[in-house]
Image: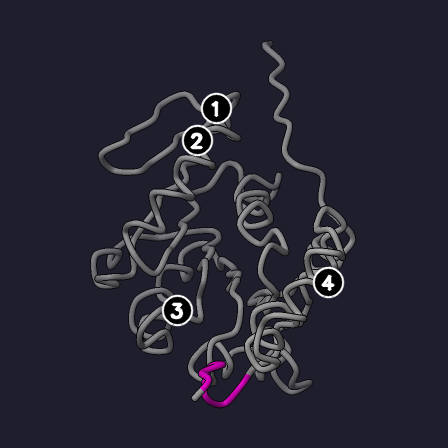
């Protein structure tokens, strides 16, 4: 039997915390350059989902393409069939990873997944409608789970999901708030320089992952 080794970026402590404490529905509010996309790709190929279909959802087609290229590079050792037109990677264990743009959430209707990843979830227009009408039903067949990853942007659907993760009565939900400096690869000098030049509210949102009522707008 052929042995294939898949080497992914090593998870830092913040990513390990989320992986270790994850529930069924997981909401990670993180600062810029935290490493959420590489963490999301990591979640797509864990042993418990490798044999199943997994769905990745990005707010726009352009953002999808950026992640698609990175995923294709990282997962090439286990890919047995790749469709660039459908943004689909089939792996040696029999599972599949499919990429979707939430420009039109209804395009994913009819799919079934063991896990879904929603990248930059705070940027998805009408995230709550997309979740309740389209994404949540895709998890029924396999009793699947979900990860919502994003830097905060106002107090819309992503913020509401974050609140569910903080509510002890919502036992299926978990949420974390992690600033950029949790990623040890980010030089503190760069963060300090940004603090010196950015408006405070922008820094709080983009770097410290704080939810602001106006989405960090400065007037």
Q: How far apart are the two marked residues, 4 and 3, measured between alpha carbons?
A: 25 Å
What is the secondary structure assignment of the residue under circle 2? helix
Quadrant showing the N terminus: top right
What separation in Å lies between label 4 and label 2 (alpha carbons)? 27 Å
Residue at image point 30% right, 38% down: 87
Give the CA distance from mark 2 to mark 3. 24 Å
Discs 1/3, front = 3
Q: Which residue is mark 2?
A: 72
C-alpha span from label 1 to label 4: 29 Å
Task: State the quadrant of the C terminus.
Answer: bottom left
- Numbered disc in front, either 4 or 3: 3
Helix, strand or loop at mark 4: helix
Q: Counting other residues with Cα less than 10 Å from the Cα at mark 1, is it few (<14), some (14-19), or many (20 or more)?
A: some
Residue at label 3?
Answer: 123
Question: Badge 1 is on which residue?
Answer: 76
Is 108 in front, or is 140?
108
Residue beneath label 4, please? 21
In this view, the residue in front, 167 or 140, is 167
Q: Nearer the viewer, residue 135 or 125?
A: 125
């Amino acid at each position: 039997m052929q042995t294939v080794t898949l080497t992914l970026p090593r998870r830092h402590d913040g990513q390990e915390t989320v992986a270790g404490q994850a529930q069924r529905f997981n909401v990670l509010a993180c600062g810029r350059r935290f490493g959420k996309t590489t963490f999301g790709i990591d979640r797509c190929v864990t042993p418990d989902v490798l044999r199943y279909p997994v769905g990745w959802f990005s707010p726009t087609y352009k953002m999808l393409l950026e992640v698609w290229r990175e995923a294709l590079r990282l997962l090439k050792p286990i890919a047995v069939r790749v469709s660039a037109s459908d943004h689909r990677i089939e792996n040696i264990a029999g599972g599949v990873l499919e990429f979707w743009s939430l420009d039109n959430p209804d395009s994913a209707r009819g799919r079934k997944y063991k896990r879904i990843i929603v990248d930059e979830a705070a940027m998805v227009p009408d995230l709550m409608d997309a979740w309740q009408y389209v994404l949540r039903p895709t998890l029924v067949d396999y009793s699947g789970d979900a990860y919502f990853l994003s830097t905060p942007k106002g107090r819309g659907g992503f913020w509401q999901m974050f609140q569910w993760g903080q509510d002890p009565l919502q036992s299926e939900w978990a949420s974390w708030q992690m600033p950029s400096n949790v990623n040890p690869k980010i030089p503190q000098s760069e963060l300090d320089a940004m603090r010196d030049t950015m408006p405070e509210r922008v820094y709080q949102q983009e770097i410290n992952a704080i939810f602001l009522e106006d989405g960090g707008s400065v007037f």
